[in-house]
Amino acid sequence: MIRGLFFISLLIQVTLAQKPAAAPSPKKWLTLNGNEPLVIARGGLSGLFPESSEYATKMAMDTSVSNVVMLCSLQLTKDGIGICQSNIKLDNSTNIALVFPKASKTYNVNGQQVHGWFAVDYTSQQLSDNVTLVQNVFSRPSSFDGLLPISGVEDVVGAKPPQVWLNVQYEKFYTEHKLSVVDYVVKAMNTMSYISSPEIGFLKTMSGKVNKVKTKLIFVFLEPDAVEPTTNKKYSAILNDLASIKSFATGILVPKEYIWPVDANKYLEPATTLVADAHKQSLEVYASGFANDYFASYNYSYDPTAEYLQFIDNSQFAVDGVVTDFPPTASEAIACLAMNNGSKPTKGNALIITHNGASGIYPPCTDLAYQQAVDDGADIIDCSVQMSKDGVAFCLDSPDLMGGTTAMTSFISRATSIPEIQQNNGIFSFDLTWSEIQTLKPEMISPFGTNAGMQRNPANKNAGKLMTLAEFLEFAKTKAVSGILINIEYAAYLASNKGLSVVDAVTAALSNATLDQQSTQQVLIQSDDSSVLSKFANVPTYKRVLHLKEEISDAPKQPVDELKKYANAVTVPRPSIITIDGGFATSKTNIVKELHAANISVYASVMRNEFVAIAYDLFSDPMVELATYIAGMEVDGVVTEYPGTASKYMRSPCSNLDANLPYFILPAEPGQLLNLVPAEVMPPAAAPSPALDVADVVDPPLPALANKSDTTNPADVAPPPRSSGMVFVANVGMSLLTIMVLSLLSLGY
Ligand SMILES: *[C@@H]1O[C@H](CO)[C@@H](O)[C@H](O)[C@H]1NC(C)=O
Ligand SMILES: *[C@@H]1O[C@H](CO)[C@@H](O)[C@H](O)[C@H]1NC(C)=O
Ligand SMILES: *[C@@H]1O[C@H](CO)[C@@H](O)[C@H](O)[C@H]1NC(C)=O
Ligand SMILES: *[C@@H]1O[C@H](CO)[C@@H](O)[C@H](O)[C@H]1NC(C)=O
Ligand SMILES: *[C@@H]1O[C@H](CO)[C@@H](O)[C@H](O)[C@H]1NC(C)=O
Ligand SMILES: *[C@@H]1O[C@H](CO)[C@@H](O)[C@H](O)[C@H]1NC(C)=O
Ligand SMILES: *[C@@H]1O[C@H](CO)[C@@H](O)[C@H](O)[C@H]1NC(C)=O
């Protein structure tokens, strides 16, 4: 029913031959039956497309493990037809309120007065002829709204997913409306592998009717304080009597917090004993509520696969399945990442290069951020070199101490405007002595803001200490990293205005650390200024990296030939490789191929786990983004603030698309998803970025070092007036601006 299926071609190019799996090393799962946990797709790939729509169902099947379960939440129409919608009200997920503007109703639903539009008031014909689905979660694309009809249970079954799970939440309500859910489910049950419900009466009825070999009955726990309609007991009370559940169900489905509770500060507490207790009763345990774009806990560092692993790959227990809006991500965790410690210690060739150390987890450029990066498997740790007034070179992302340290609280009087460096005022490292800088505390940077769900690890707010360049080099030499990247900016400004030579400081430090000689560790010198790179040409073991900070769309031969004179590699913003428009990956550029033809390596910058930084086509999934750049676009390295995530991907067997495996982490194909979006709702195409130009590559020679006593520090000459009101305004204004600029910058890179 509900309008015929129209075939859509695969959105992801799965042209790899499906080879039979090589005998995989047997994995011993801590699930009840020892098998791998199930991926249960709530409404298909509902993290991208409207729930249970044709696109959501097909896409979930194309991108998930081969035994994926499609979960449909049953609602009934006036004529007794089953449709798949989680919410008993249709106004949240369809355009029904626009189609029938005066037809809303208020009904008693299990004791609550609920106002809205209900399926029981419409025939299936009325719905299929008039109503279309919309995306009801604001972080998900609305581009597919109004395109697709509500799916019936038969549509989902008709798409032939490996298994179907029917969730029946409102048996009591529909019975009150003279519709028999039991009759409906009895007719449908031979196509169902699972039938679940939060209503004990319904499950007891079904228990006498289903073929238990074919269909499992699962009891659903709602929030602890909600009341179960048959017994009038709270779900929290029923939890204490798991043994009684065994008489009518083979398993339970619980919100994930029942297993791993989260405290008020959004950190994970120790696990409850629920899984072990239920397994002791021979009850399977399924957990729900997984989605890449909902914040779960800081413990996961915005890596959604980390959360699944917490549930399936801890040493104590594994749940028997996870209910998710993003089935490809759950599939990766189960098929590729779980229990493969030590199974693939080597990784592919692409370099994992940090951006200020593991700055997603600790304050950027601190000893702790670098140690975390080493522990997480980074290949190259990076130091962006800044200079103090007294000539001490140290590591920090920016010469402006306002981002990344507590300078605002103690040195606001040193704030100055330096348009050559940035538009807004700053407290610059070269205006403070190293001993002054050492009094500052490092600060966590949250590039996407500090709102709930965007802030980075508040528990590490001021953890760690900054390192001098010399300390950084000594640290790196004792660690198992394959190399270091030294990033140099503003060398010309520092020479002519401050009498400071950052080039000399770096040269001396590398020499003192004997890294200018043959070493097992590689030294990458990066700058946005090719004249700086020229200064390091005399040491052939250094790899010189030109940082092309502006997006480019092409790399023609002439500028590339010029580039070759200065650099062996480039670092480019991610959109120079895959263009992004309106949150979608729109196309691939040729720059990786063009630069490879000239033997120039390409590093993509900056990878961040937060879902807002990742295009919809990549499923808001950092693993898919890594696959797309590394396996798909063949970059030579990724610059990342979460080296642990990159390392997990690179060390997973599924990152090798030539391996003999049943499942891979597949690169997305830019532009394919947009084919599904009608032209009239496409965002107007943005002007393409310019091609690389010779002028982007060639920089003026570095100026001579100014006589230090001639350079003036405006803060020394004229301290700003200390009228408290003014200072306060400036203070607040600058911090907001800093945050705004930071987040604008981070989106592009
Ligand atoms: C809804 O569809 C029916 C046909 O099934 C049609 O008669 C009716 O006019 C439509 N209603 C609206 C509001 O468009
Ligand atoms: C739909 O419902 C959810 C959950 O109740 C809510 O968070 C969301 O904002 C709603 N969406 C719309 C478009 O009203
Ligand atoms: C979560 O992180 C916090 C803070 O780092 C830590 O104290 C806690 O033990 C972690 N929880 C789990 C379950 O690992
Ligand atoms: C690998 O996993 C096994 C089983 O979970 C565990 O015993 C072992 O300590 C792990 N090894 C490492 C290196 O993490
Ligand atoms: C030179 O290297 C030694 C260790 O080999 C270190 O202790 C010292 O601080 C370094 N000096 C400079 C100026 O970098
Ligand atoms: C490419 O560059 C590397 C150094 O980055 C060099 O060792 C190699 O010989 C070059 N290959 C060609 C074909 O130019
Ligand atoms: C720097 O300035 C001082 C005094 O202003 C002068 O004595 C010295 O010769 C100058 N040095 C250079 C290299 O210009």
Image (cartoon, rainbow, N blue to C red):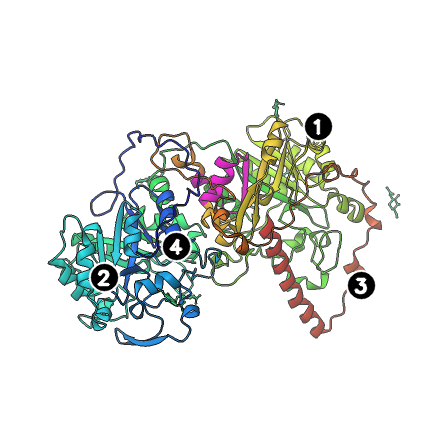
* Residue type for callout 1: Asn
Could you give the CA–CA distance between mark 4 and mark 3, rounded to whole angstroms?
Answer: 59 Å
Q: Which residue is mark 1?
A: 538
Q: Which residue shows up at 23% across the image and 58% down it?
A: 196
Residue extent of the magenta highlight: 623-649
Q: First in sequence: mark 4 or mark 3?
A: 4
Could you give the CA–CA distance between mark 1 and mark 2, rounded to whole angstroms?
Answer: 72 Å
Q: First in sequence: mark 4 or mark 1?
A: 4
Q: First in sequence: mark 1 or mark 2?
A: 2
Q: Which residue is mark 3?
A: 718
Badge number at residue 197: 2
Q: First in sequence: mark 2 or mark 3?
A: 2
* Residue type for callout 2: Ser
114 over 685 or under it: above or below: below
From the image, state whether disc 1 or disc 3 is nearer to you.
1
Instruction: Check disc 3: other Cα within 10 Å, few if <14, some if 14-19, many if 20+.
Output: few
Could you give the CA–CA distance between mark 1 and mark 3, rounded to whole angstroms?
Answer: 43 Å
